Image (tube, rainbow, N blue to C red):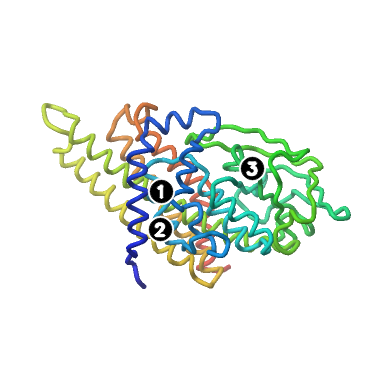
Amino acid sequence: MNFSFTEEQLALQDTLQRFVAKDYTFEKRQQFMAGPDGFSRDAWSTYAELGILALPFPEEFGGLNGTALDIYLTMRALGTGLTLEPYVGTVVLCGDLIKRLANAEQKASLIPQICDGTLMLALAHYEPQSRYCESAINAHAVRHGDNWTLQGHKAVVLGAAGANQLLVSARTSGQAGAEDGISLFLVPADTAGLALSRYACHDGTRAADIVLNDVVVDAHALLGPEGQAFTAIMQAIALTNVALTAEATGIMQALNAATLDYLKTRKQFGVALSSFQALQHRLADMAIATEQADSMALLAAIEMESADFAARVQRASGAKTFVGQKARLVGQDAIQMHGGIGVTDELIVGHYFKRLTVINSSFGDLDFHLQRYSDMIVPA
């Protein structure tokens, strides 16, 4: 297995690191977070110019034919800047669903708009009762002639606050909990009967709860075969979790650097805190945990190219569990070694920790993925 990066991938990583250092400082991020969108549309336009919005899409639709490894490098770099833009939701999650389910006409319409930054998407899938279970869908869609009518309630839809269109899952047959019968619909955010309750998440990103009350869409809104969207949703969520683990490792690297810098400058008893052996040992533990997590995230990204659907889901759950455990260790130690200032809004360290906490709770928490991973390696 080749773990080497190409010159193009290294150049992409270097470009994004320079962008974050120059144009996405902590002070600017605070301004973006307080704005009406909760992120920077100028930064989103820059993403389009840099090509990362087009990264995972086929060349025939204006994409760059990137792989999950390219996404890993992108997310790790963006993680150091705590970027607020809905890159994961639009490009990784919804982008993968469009690649897997949309027909040629839909791809030709949607993908170029994602690539040039004019289209933002959000997946409205999880519901209040589902607790991460991808098949626990009660929302339903009924066909009336050439149209579909959608009813249901979606919870904590990440990125919905700024999305132009939503990918909404709904049952067209079967009972809640059944894998068959789930369909996916493309619904404009301003469609009549669709109500969004927007709010800020713990890490400063935006989400929304969505109520669908007699939302009518035409037949072209259906993505893929009716009732057969479950496998594509599972694969897209697996890829998203791998992208989030890459983002987490970027944050962990930034936390290590910030903590080391703080210990070098903060003095106690007339000497720098970094001279204390106990703190040196904790820094070493943080560095080891970060390297282990990064290796797991990298391996999971490589495994996303596997043709085996079950292997991809298993690797994603394993990575989410392992990286989440290491992220908790690094985040908590960084906060403790900064002391009280580590939890203030004026210091980026607390914001890094909040983002790691939200990552660990998004698309399945540690307990959920540990259970899934154990069930897959030791079937009942």
Q: Residue at x 60, y 61 (%)?
A: 99
Q: Nearer the viewer, residue 375 or 50?
A: 50
Q: Residue at x 32, y 43 (%)?
A: 254
Task: Say what amino acid the circle numbered 1 marks.
Answer: Ala
* Element marked by disc 3: loop
Q: Is residue 258 left or right of residue 216?
A: left
Task: Say what amino acid the circle numbered 3 marks.
Answer: Asn
* Element marked by disc 1: helix
Residue holding disc 2: 297
Please, is residue 208 above or below residue 90 in the view?
above
> Pointers 2 and 1 in contact (CB under 8 A)?
yes
**Pointer 1 or 3: first along the chain:** 3
Q: Nearer the viewer, residue 378 or 201?
A: 201
Circle 2 packing at 10 Å, graded few (<14), some (14-19), many (20+), is many
Real-space CA distance between mark 2 and mark 1, rounded to the nearest whole angstrom: 9 Å
Residue holding disc 1: 248
Residue holding disc 3: 164
Circle 3 packing at 10 Å, graded few (<14), some (14-19), many (20+), is some
Residue 61 in picture, x, y percent from top left: 58, 61
What residue occupies the far left of the structure in this picture? 270
Real-space CA distance between mark 1 and mark 3, rounded to the nearest whole angstrom: 27 Å
Residue 20 in picture, x, y percent from top left: 36, 42
Q: Nearer the viewer, mark 2 or mark 3?
A: 3
Real-space CA distance between mark 2 and mark 3, rounded to the nearest whole angstrom: 31 Å
Task: Say what amino acid the circle numbered 2 marks.
Answer: Ala
Please, is residue 28 above or below residue 315 in the view?
above
To which quarter of the image does residue 200 belong?
Answer: top right
Q: Residue at x 51, y 68 (%)?
A: 311
> Pointers 2 and 3 in contact (CB under 8 A)?
no
